[in-house]
Amino acid sequence: MMRNTLQNLLYNNNYDQPDTSAAAFNTLPSIIQQVLLQQQRIVLIANNPSINTASLEALLQPTDMLVLFNDFIHADFFANNPIVRDLPKLLFFRQIGDSALHFGLPPRSNNLTAMLDMAKQAPLGILFGNTDYQFPLPADDPNPNDDPITASRILDIPKLLNDLLHSDEHCRVLSEQHSVVADYPIFADIHSSAPTSGFLLYRLLLAARLEVQQRQDVETPLSIVMLGFNDEDRTAHFWEGHNWAFERRELATPFDSVEIIRQY
């Protein structure tokens, strides 16, 4: 497979390349930077409804850091299960187009109650796609019928979470044009064309773990597990603005110490 400069950096741990690894590490909330220097494995968990809690209990280990996306599945499990609640977590909320909204946060469907429990029990980091969270109102939603508000929808953010969202220690912004995806072929004719959330975080953490490896002066990088990132047509939704072919080609030959677990 032909590899560009970024891919050579990721495959070869070549620290003479531009400092993509340090840029990736420094993009993360500082509490997650500390976690990566302590934990042994990163587990990215897709919003795949076929993932069940029994398989998660069998997979997850005390030395894991979890990465969850948008309106993540099994929220109560991740927040309160005795095996999982003490694991550090990184949450990624993607901006919806170029609106004031992010998937998984008010006024859209959200897991604020679970997030509050998570924040009380283990290190919690938050990444926003492209822009800080702007605390939008329902009237700011350009497409409210995509996610109609129900009586059970939580619209008010508790103080503890509000404080985290304003904290540089816990919360940062991740651009979809970050240097870790500089080689990503977007579709110029599709508005907001960009990597998938999973691929963007995968590349970010691939690069960040090189910085961890350098700081720890060890030969073996942190392990990465990708759970439920399927690449076939049984997955319900493939937005045409993501370059699925490019992502599938790369994930077909994973980097060292990367395990991809398809979940059906």
Image (cartoon, rainbow, N blue to C red):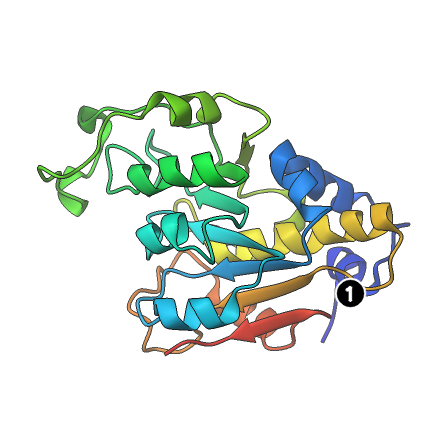
Secondary structure of the residue carrying numbered label 1:
helix
**Residue 62 visible somewhere in the drawing:** yes
On the picture, is 218 further left or further right than 262?
right
**Quadrant for the N terminus in the image:** bottom right
**Quadrant for the C terminus in the image:** bottom left
| 66 vs 100: above or below | below
Q: Report the number of discs.
A: 1
Closer to us: 126 or 34: 34
Closer to us: 144 or 172: 172
Residue 153 drawn at (x, y percent): 17, 37
On the picture, is 77 further left or further right than 257?
left
Amino acid type at circle 1 is: Tyr
- Is the residue marked by circle 1 packed among few (<14), some (14-19), or many (20+) residues within 10 Å? some
On the picture, is 31 further left or further right than 229?
right
| 250 vs 86: above or below | below
User: Can you identify the residue that label 1 sits on?
Assistant: 11
Closer to us: 223 or 11: 223
Q: Residue at x 34, y 42 (%)?
A: 114
Q: Residue at x 39, y 45 (%)?
A: 191
Q: Residue at x 52, y 59 (%)?
A: 44
Residue 121 drawn at (x, y percent): 47, 39
**Outermost front residue:** 82
Residue 201 drawn at (x, y percent): 56, 52
| Picture quadrant of residue 155 | top left
Residue 133 drawn at (x, y percent): 41, 28
**Residue 183 visible somewhere in the drawing:** no
